[in-house]
Image (cartoon, rainbow, N blue to C red):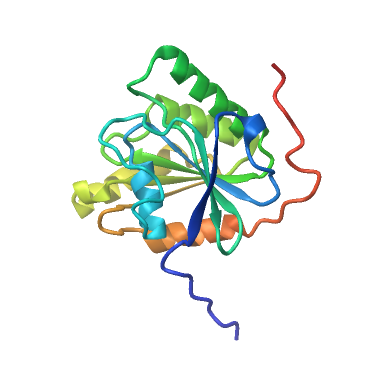
Amino acid sequence: MTEKVSLPERLEATFLTSAPDLRRCPPGDCPEVAFAGRSNAGKSSVLNELTGNRKTAKVSKTPGRTQLLNFFDVRTGGRMVDLPGYGYAKAGRDAQQNWQKAVNHYLSYREALVGIVLVMDIRHPNQAFDQELLQWSHDSELPVHILLNKADKLSFSAQRQALQKIRSAYADFPLVTVQCHSALRRIGTPELLAQLFTWLGTPITESENSAQPQD
């Protein structure tokens, strides 16, 4: 009989570096999981809850504070990458366009990328950017785990309805998985950790991460 392996309750991670663009990212020598989502969907709170450290990622009431690609080394192997949020941000249009370009290049050319956690506010899911990212990932055959965050804001019945609606919307996307989550109440954390540890165990070959965007 195979012994069941218990997963850690937290993800031990330390900040590695920030990069303004793909060319200044660290070497892609280990699997990376990117956290994406609209501004104010709760990405930073999710990262902090996963690590048990409120200082892992900066949390702000002002959307759009994450302006760089932020890399975190995971003790057991691999990295998490906090991407700038899409949508409203208190910054000029040029700055927002630079963030979007950096994110697009990272998603398109980073061979070390093995999966994306797409954080949505469960009360306002499947916005335009979410749909675009999911279609792109489907075409690129890249797995996405949709995190319907802030689930504590809804009743259990409403959570289940929202979950089923998103699952039905992407039933034809075989590499998309969906779950409810609450960073505040730790709802769904074991399920999310299981997905992360599965992805972070993906081997990376020496030939990967060689592609670069053409300016």
Choose between 139 and 12: the one closer to the eye: 12
Residue 144 shows up from this direction: yes
**Position above or below: 40 against 185:** above
Q: Quadrant of the C terminus?
A: top right
**Position above or below: 138 against 183:** above
Residue 56: give x, y in percent of width and height: 41, 50
Residue 140: give x, y in percent of width and height: 64, 34
Q: Quadrant of the N terminus?
A: bottom right
Q: Residue furthest top?
A: 93
Identify which residue is drawn at 30% across, 41% down. 122
Identify which residue is drawn at 33% across, 42% down. 42
Residue 90: give x, y in percent of width and height: 32, 21
Identify which residue is drawn at 61% across, 27% down. 105
Identify which residue is drawn at 56% across, 83% down. 3
Residue 175 shows up from this direction: no
Which of the 4 image quarters holds residue 77?
Answer: bottom right
Residue 185: give x, y in percent of width and height: 25, 58
Horizontal side of 93 relative to 182 (left or right) equals: right
